[in-house]
Amino acid sequence: MSSLKPGWKMVKFGEVVKNANLVERDPETNGVERIVGLEHIDPKNLHIRRWNSVVDGTSFTRKFVPGQTLFGKRRAYQRKVAYAEFEGICSGDILTFEPKNRKVLLPELLPFICQSDAFFDHALDTSAGSLSPRTSWTALKDFEFPLPPIDEQKRIAEILWAADESAEAERLVNANLEKLLQVKINHFAHQEAERGNEHFLADCIEPNRPITYGILKPGLNFEGGIPVVKVRDYPNGVIVLDDLLHTTPEIEKEYKRSRLVPGDILISIRGTVGRVAEVPPELDGANITQDTARLSIKSDLHHRYVRTILESNYVQRQITAKITGLAVQGINIGELRKIRIPIPDLKIQEQFASECIAIRSAQACCARSIASLKTLVEGFFEASVNGEGAHV
């Protein structure tokens, strides 16, 4: 850490922050309406957007109030911090922080301190337990950090909250685009189905590359091997390339029937059933596991149209109706082949796919903006608390 700027000082967290520990044993009578658990706090997002209602009952008694910073002490690696904008009751695994003196530490700066890498490193280093590690207030209050003068705190907080506000605006746009996309897809699918423009999924597939699942036992990761896509690798419709399993050429060779080419469509058939993704150029020659089916769309159909319509309620409900199993749910390939797909003329497919792609592109733009703003916030704050913020 660089030498401190004039007016800055090193402090321990517990010297300037207190763990409020307010108690509310009868929230419904006293007009407290919301219950917040760890599951309601999103990692790296200071805003609480979900909660349960007190009328549904709760055993929690810890109360929080507006202006406090909520910190998830269990599994701190999840980086769950929130700034309270309303009062409520929270889980015992959430600590409720507030400044001891607002003339020494601004409440608006506190959540960013708790979001810093240094604070989380301290929380992780002081966590105990294997299955569900927890840190504690006793451990966290010993965290040391450089505290700027109050005027500098105001400047830093204003910049950080302005960036956060911009990110929230982008998230709202993104959410509205997602709603628009889903309404568009669902309306179109039902409209075409009512017109009788349907084919079985099997009839949409290249005959020489039929619907198939992938490798049963890909083994441990083999450095330099063949990439294998699992269901977890495409959680939101896009295959995440960063952490793919690689199998040996010998194992993959036994499953050459399920090799991938760019433009293939993947659909999950076990566990979380019905996820869809398109194979990008980077995965030419890769493979899949038994939990995923490969769809090679006929050349006289628009593959991105088929990929999009597979996500419609019309198709997803058919898939759900054919799921079997208790411990591990799934749909077999035979039933998948019988799924009915609305298929209009090719020109209509192309136009519809193009419109949906435009919406997805706008969503990707929002996601990039949010990521950039998050990087800006993290970088600016880390520089600031290291005494370098005076130059920003």
Image (cartoon, grey):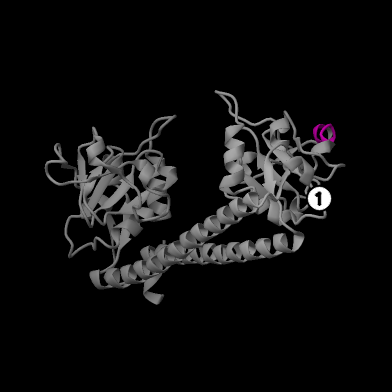
Residue 116 vs residue 313, the one in the foreground: 313
What span is in magenta? 251-255
Disc 1: which residue: 298
The outermost residue toward the front is: 195
Q: Position of residue 360 (x, y in %)?
A: 59, 61
Q: Residues within 10 Å of mark 1 (few under 14, many from 20)?
A: some
Question: Residue 292 sits in which quadrant?
Answer: top right
Q: Residue at x 47, y 62 (%)?
A: 176
Q: Residue at x 69, y 56 (%)?
A: 305
Residue 94 vs residue 102, the one in the foreground: 94
Would residue 216 appear left or right of 254 to someone viewing this image? Answer: left
Residue 57 vs residue 94, the one in the foreground: 57
Magenta stretch: dominant SS?
Answer: helix
Tally of numbered discs: 1
Question: Residue 2 sits in which quadrant?
Answer: bottom left
Compared with 47, 336 (above or below) is above
The outermost residue toward the right is: 208
* Residue type at the position of mark 1: Lys
